[in-house]
Amino acid sequence: MTAKRNLTENECLLLLKSVSDALAENRPEDAAPLIAENLRTAFGVTRVSIREIVPYPYSLLCAYEALGDAAEHRHISETAAFEEAVWQQALAAYEEGLVVYQAGGEQQLPPYMAVTTAAAVNIMQVPMFLGTYFRGVLELADFESPHDWSARERFTLKICADMLCRNLYSHTHFNPALHGGNENDIDPLTGLMGFRLFTKKLDETLAALEPNMPVCVIYTDIHHFKYINETYGYKKGDELLKQAAQVMSNAAPPNTLVSRVYADHFVSASAIATELIPSFDAFIHEQNKALGEILMEICPDVRIRVVTGICYVNSSDITGATAIANANLARKTAKSENIHKPVVFSESMMEAIKYQEYLNNELPKAIENHDLKVYYQPKINCTDDSLYGAEALVRWQRPDGTFVYPDQFIPVFEKNGYIIDVDFYVYREVFRYIRGRIDAGLPVFPISMNVSRVHFRTDKFIPYIDTLLEEYKIPPELIEFELTENIYMKNLGKADAFVKACRSRGIQVSMDDFGSGYSSLNLISTISIDTLKIDKIFLKNDTLSDNDKTVIESMIAMAKRLGMKVICEGVETEVQTVFLKRTQCDQIQGYYYARPMDEAHYNQFIEQHHS
Ligand code: C2E
Ligand code: CA
Ligand code: CA
């Protein structure tokens, strides 16, 4: 086993910047998983966990976790409690500083590390102290290769952990839901009942459900609370939370349970007579408006809005946890769809989630049965409207003939890693297709394929492409891979190595969705790609504003200076086409010329457009 490469100074700085950006742009609890993932990819380890101390009995509970593809390591988030003596030992070690364990050396796995991670090859634990209070550890565990942590990396991790700890613990009583060692806990900030106690009481209430008295579970959060915290400071934020808690308790019907889940997330549960339900939604809406106004007295410059999801429970089959999750799902719907009234949970929301699960279950079969279809969208040369080539786009054909589009399943499969199988399937289909045309003596054109970010977590991509090149003997210049701007930015080192590996094989690489995210104008001068693919958002208007034109023109000019080709995607109108041709854009892809089409139609298209 070879040890991992150490991060360079530049990489460490980039990492620190990504951590501080994540904390600046998100609520701490939302930033934490992002940071864990950033650390995981930067150091190439299997798992990064942010563990917090839970005092009764002592344990390091995993609050956030980022995992690599190694599925067998997925289940390790549970926690074992420390025995008192081991705990004292652990605390002494953490007070000393970073704790590292490397398998295979002289050192035995210390018992306190075995509590969180037994099977890793390499473990790095960075203790998090807030003042003198030990709050938890940031843990990087690698199950595959050793790592010789450099002084610079240790220093970087220490700063990351400090930033995380300060943000996670200073203002909110971070995830009290996880703390509930003591069921009689109250939330120290708001004085509301602890969340653990709440769920227990809710379970009891639901078990004793009376006919015609459904229980209404309400999940609420304060929109823009993060902004308030940042603008007015955490003290004001705390004041606001206390006030919100008070208003919610006072306004609630008698016997209502009210609790705070964490941060600005509150739950309540009240039994409501069935005939009152229609007016109850309206009542909650009015109450939310009133709450917003009261809170705005504390922070007068912010339009505070309270976002609420409701779940009515009239069956004892539903547990408290499910009811809370359902209400929370309804809240998320309200938030994402920008609905200003409370949203009531419905089965259709659940349907969406079930549908994703269904897709997950069906995928292996779909690949086996060739239900995934590769569509080709032509790319047209600007100079003479001739065919340049095509982009391969995947679709999933259901047995009833309907199609599922990639935007619906790719995000799901990126989460669980299935996307690798999907992409490899698409690549093989494309290679097979080109081989077929060569064998039939037909003209061939380059085809580009999309590369998911997930490939950067494994080392399978290049070997797989080598196998395909070998197997199908395709001239590499007919192959192009599209990497999104996002992938480049988030995996600079790996992306660079990837581009080099492709280009050394004669395969082309393009930067997809350029301008949609970081607008990393100076990045592209450092990375050597063949083609810049300007994102379709620049063409969202049928006609082009002067601003849009200037932006597109300067992107094209810059790419040209760097010796790259430029393609615009999402071109739908003649006005856009005329403009792009004038600006020296090389190729155009979009509905104006052609929609993505199946293999047979693409063959016909080639015949018609190939002179
Ligand atoms: P993308 O790479 O940006 O692909 C272009 C998307 O824009 C395609 O949607 C295409 O159908 C659509 N499009 C093309 N011309 C126009 C136009 O003139 N106007 C508009 N409004 N849209 C146009 P599609 O096929 O639904 O794919 C969506 C995304 O899914 C792709 O975005 C790509 O990120 C991803 N994707 C598709 N196939 C694959 C694949 O095999 N592997 C991976 N990893 N991702 C894929
Ligand atoms: Ca693409
Ligand atoms: Ca694109």
Image (tube, rainbow, N blue to C red):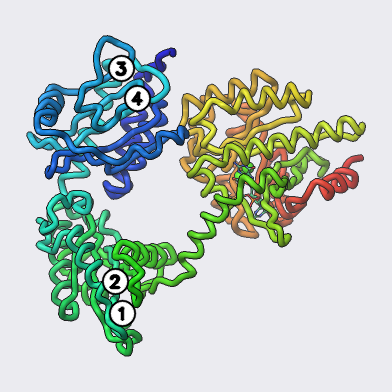
Name the image quarter holding the N terminus: top left
Reading the image, the residue beneath label 3 is 102
Q: Report if residue 386 is visible in the image.
A: yes
Q: Residue furthest bottom?
A: 275
Please tell me whether residue 47 is drawn above or below residue 406 in the rendered image: above
Residue 583, x across and y down, in percent: 68, 42
Reading the image, the residue beneath label 1 is 214
Say whether marks 1 and 3 touch (CB < 8 Å).
Answer: no
Residue toward you, 483 or 125 = 125
Mark before the other along the chain sequence, 1 or 4: 4
Q: Amino acid at mark 3?
A: Gln
Q: Using the numbered discs, state the Cα–Cα distance from disc 2 to disc 1 in whole angstroms.
A: 10 Å
Residue shown at 54% from the left, 51% from the top: 547
Q: Using the numbered discs, state the Cα–Cα distance from disc 1 to disc 4 in whole angstroms.
A: 49 Å
Reading the image, the residue beneath label 4 is 120
Q: Using the numbered discs, state the Cα–Cα distance from disc 1 to disc 3 in whole angstroms.
A: 56 Å
Which dot marks residue 217?
2
Residue toward you, 603 or 486 = 603
Ligand 1 within 8 Å of disc 2? The answer is: no
Residue 154, x across and y down, in percent: 26, 21
Q: Amino acid at mark 1?
A: Pro
SS class, disc 3: strand
